[in-house]
Image (cartoon, helix red, strand yellow):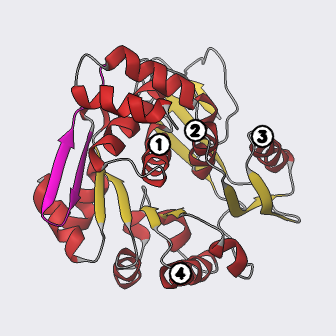
């Protein structure tokens, strides 16, 4: 539930009157919808409660063309919800209520893993069992099958046991995280140094999301900073998830690594101009049109457009 407010902080005894509330899906659903809008075939393995919110999530994902056959309904449980407060500068704060979504305990569908081109997960699934055991099993099988794993540790990174996290990173193809998370993991805010620490743990590619400042991408013996796009900010909710979706889309389309950063920055930039979550993610056509408006900034954008238009 997204609630626009005038400003932070909200202090004790404060009374705020919101203009309206907007019901949206969030979290991994942002990523799924954004991926589908870009033309990827995606599916979810997870749980929802037996309630109105669970039905809302399932119906919306189904409408967006996402495979929900592995989205289980837990009888008698409520669906996890989050209140998102957004101020007039587009900054946000969250209040979460636990519910179905973390109790992943079904058997791993090996055939579904085999048919996948990539696996994406977040740190929420690594905090505790049974979702932890399920996720580790999926990643083990994906690694054995040489299927790339994309991992965003998210705001619960400090809740993941160090040995589990290190084991997971060693099997991660691409680590997507923000500057707060990278500093927590490496104890440094220096991007190149932080990336080298993470690469030494076995990660193949480190992608650090820098908001309006774009992103920093690093591999062994290579790093590049790709600046962001200047846009009016309405709501930053879900921008990181949508960045991730666009990056993986570009990866699966086998675009050069600098183009991955450009396309991901562009998708995130479009999102922050709109109030809402994944439903406000850009389509491939909207992404192309946005980049056409920006192509005077860099020759790389012009070359990227030629590749996107022909796909």
User: Looking at the image, do the residues carrying marks 4 and 2 touch, with CB atoms under 8 Å apart?
Assistant: no
242 with respect to 256 (left or right): right
- Which mark is first along the chain, 3 or 4? 3
Alpha carbons under labels 4 and 1: distance apart: 24 Å
Give the residue pinned by disc 3.
60
Counting from the top left corner in percent of width and height, residue 156 is at 44, 61
Which disc number belongs to residue 145? Answer: 4
Give the residue pinned by disc 2.
38
Counting from the top left corner in percent of width and height, residue 191 is at 15, 53
Total label count? 4
- Position of the N terminus, as image quadrant, is top right
Counting from the top left corner in percent of width and height, residue 307 is at 42, 36
Part of the protein shown in magenta = 215-235
Which disc number belongs to residue 246? Answer: 1
Alpha carbons under labels 4 and 3: distance apart: 32 Å
Alpha carbons under labels 4 and 2: distance apart: 26 Å
Residue 41, magenta (yes or no): no
């Amino acid at each position: 539930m997204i609630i626009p407010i005038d400003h932070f902080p909200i202090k004790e005894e404060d009374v705020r009157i919101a203009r309206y509330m907007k019901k949206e899906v969030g979290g991994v659903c942002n990523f799924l919808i954004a991926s589908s809008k870009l033309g990827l075939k995606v599916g979810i393995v997870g749980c929802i409660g037996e309630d109105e919110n669970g039905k809302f999530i399932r119906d919306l994902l189904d409408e967006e063309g996402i495979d929900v056959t592995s989205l289980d309904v837990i009888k008698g449980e409520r669906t996890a919800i989050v209140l998102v407060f957004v101020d007039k500068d587009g900054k946000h704060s969250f209040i979460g209520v636990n519910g179905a979504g973390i109790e992943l305990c079904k058997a791993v569908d090996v055939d579904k893993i085999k048919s996948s081109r990539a696996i994406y997960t977040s740190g929420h699934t690594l905090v505790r069992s049974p979702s932890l055991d399920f996720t580790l099993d999926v990643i083990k099988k994906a690694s054995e099958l040489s299927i790339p794993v994309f991992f965003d540790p998210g705001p619960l990174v400090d809740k993941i046991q160090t040995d589990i996290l290190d084991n997971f990173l060693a099997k991660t193809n691409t680590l997507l995280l923000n500057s707060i998370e990278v500093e927590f993991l490496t104890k440094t805010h220096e991007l190149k140094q932080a990336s080298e620490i993470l690469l030494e743990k076995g990660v193949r590619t480190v992608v650090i999301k820098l908001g309006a400042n774009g992103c920093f991408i690093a591999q062994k013996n290579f790093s590049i900073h790709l600046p962001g796009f200047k846009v009016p900010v309405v709501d930053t909710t879900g921008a990181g998830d949508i960045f991730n979706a666009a990056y993986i889309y570009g990866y699966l389309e086998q675009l050069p690594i600098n183009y991955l950063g450009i396309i991901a920055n562009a998708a995130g930039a479009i999102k922050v101009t709109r109030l809402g979550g994944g439903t406000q993610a850009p389509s491939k056509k909207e992404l192309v049109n946005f980049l056409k408006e920006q192509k005077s900034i860099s020759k790389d954008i012009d070359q990227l457009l030629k590749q996107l238009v022909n796909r």
